[in-house]
Image (cartoon, helix red, strand yellow):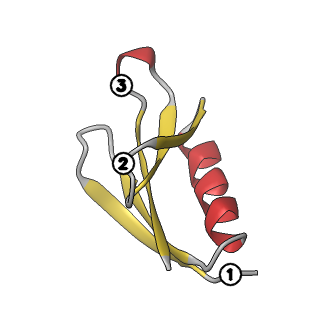
Amino acid sequence: MGQRHVVPGGGGGGWKVVGAATGSTESSTDTQADAIDEARRQLESSDGGEILIHGIDGSVRDRRTVQSS
């Protein structure tokens, strides 16, 4: 099972989906909601996993479990 982090995009704004295993940005979006949807799609198409949703301050504010489709 995989893990994706939804984190603030930094100085450029927006939001990023970051893979936990690699630490690399998997995608960038304008809104947090879009980033959460993208992370969910990525996990559904693989083995499922967990989304860790970070707030503006970087702390984890929510976790969501995703089943593979």
User: Which residue is the site of mark 3?
Assistant: 10
Going from N to C along the chain, the mark reached first, 2 or 3, is: 3
Dot 2 alpha-carbon crowd within 10 angstroms: few under 14, some 14 to 19, many 20 or more: few
Dot 3 alpha-carbon crowd within 10 angstroms: few under 14, some 14 to 19, many 20 or more: few
User: Which residue is the site of mark 1?
Assistant: 68
Q: Regarding mark 2 in the picture, which secondary structure is present there?
A: loop
User: Which residue is the site of mark 2?
Assistant: 23
- Mark 1 vs mark 2: give the one in front: 2
Residue plotted at (64% across, 44% down): 34
Going from N to C along the chain, the mark reached first, 1 or 2, is: 2
Q: Say whether residue 60 is left or right of residue 66.
A: left
Residue type highlighted by circle 2: Gly
Q: Say whether residue 41 is left or right of residue 33.
A: right
Residue type highlighted by circle 3: Gly
Q: CA distance from mark 3 to mark 1?
A: 30 Å
Badge 1 vs badge 2, beta-carbon distance below 8 Å: no
- The x, y position of residue 1, in whole percent, is 50, 80
Q: Regarding mark 1 in the picture, which secondary structure is present there?
A: loop
Q: CA distance from mark 2 to mark 3?
A: 15 Å
Q: Which disc number belongs to residue 5?
A: none
Residue type highlighted by circle 1: Ser
Which residue is at the front of the view, 33 or 67? 67
* Vertical position of residue 69 compared to residue 46: above or below: below
